[in-house]
Amino acid sequence: MKINKAFKFLLAVVIALSLAVSASAASFTAPEKLANYLYYIDYADYTPDFAIGDNIKQGFACSAVRNGNFYGRNLDLDYADVPEFVIKVAAKEGRYASIGMAAMFDIKSSNVDKLSDAQLLALPNMTFDGINENGVAMNSNVVPAVDLDFATLVSTNYGKPRIHVLAVVRYVLDYAKSAAHGVELLKNMDIYGGYGAWGLHWMLCDEKETYIIECIDGELIARNDTDNIMTNFYVNYAPNTPYAKHIAQAGQKVAGKVYHDLPILTPHACGVERYAILKEHYAEGGKSAEAMAKLMERVKYTQAYEADTEPFWYTEFDEAKDNLSIANAPMDFKAVIQAETETYKLRDRDIHPDNFWQTWHTAVYDLANRTLRLNIQEDYSKHYDFKLN
């Protein structure tokens, strides 16, 4: 009798564990390798985590531009042995279907098959760019929170549900009916967090309009009258606020060069040259998804280490390197540039995080057709196509 009871108990445990594994496995497909550093996962469901970014201490540069139905985005990060994932999340009651790009910074490509179910169920929270079934697309880029006395990292709406900046893209893709609706959703959340001296800002669009969204002086600011370009400086100038005291009002001089017709720059503005290139060639991106990818190729990150880059990307070398700012003269950057160039020549993915950067992916979203055209690791000779529907 005792043996029978023990057997029944053991059998019940085995069945319970089997059901748990089956339920977990049913929530997503196994990661499918598409290329080096690129995997695909289909999600029936995932585990939402609004605080996902609390333990992530990484920075990234990035560029984004929208022209017509085409939305281009470069994700620029360390040249490291870290995989990315194309993730398609299915619709469920109260949540829209979406497709986009996500990554985990603390794993290597060789360990993808060792990821736990819990890690994979949390992965969609780390979505950096994507589009949902309503044609709402969004991405995140860093901005220098040091120029706002770091106040932007604390809170935008005290008393409302808290959400870390890294979870914002996933939240909007899940619930936004339109770009304007996405703005309203975020105004009812308390957004916080960043990366040390860096915060995040977002480009959010649909077929009708584009918003640049930023956290300034403890408030969410969203504008739909910008250049439809976003790199790594604040676009939403707010006069008569504490933020305004940080603005260098005397011209737009960056490392000895004056830029015209750009948003007003804060002292540690980054990506000024990339912004200027995207603005100059903006018309190219509205012709087709392929043309938008070519436009984004113009600002792939490793051009920062190429002597013939025009203009040279002086603002890519930030304060953390040598207390540099947009006011530094070009000669002040020589040592930093040389060090980065020498690292670039090594092409060693294990040098991390003090490594040169490159464009991990170039994503082009077609807002009308809900598609993703993807180039990986600055390889523009081939691309991968994904369709949400």
Image (cartoon, grey):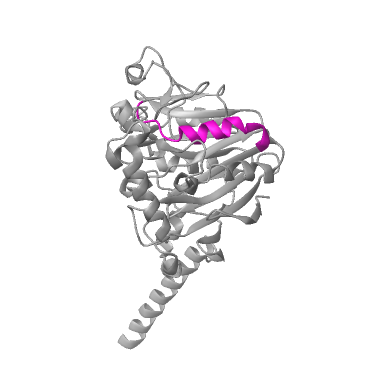
In terms of depth relative to the viewer, which is nearer, 365 or 115? Answer: 365
Residue 342 placement (x, y as % from top left)? 37, 54
Left or right: where 29 falls relative to 335? right
Residue 247 belongs to the span the image colors magenta: no
Q: Residue at x 32, y 52 (%)?
A: 354
Total count of labels: 0
Q: Residue at x 41, y 79 (%)?
A: 11
Residue 281 belongs to the span the image colors magenta: yes
In terms of depth relative to the viewer, which is nearer, 158 or 275? Answer: 275
Residue 378 placement (x, y as % from top left)? 54, 53
Q: Is residue 353 above or below residue 316?
A: below
Q: Quadrant of the N terminus?
A: bottom left
Residue 299 placement (x, y as % from top left)? 54, 42
Left or right: where 226 falls relative to 356? right
Q: Is residue 95 visible?
A: no
State the extent of the magenta-drawn residues as a range. Answer: 267-285
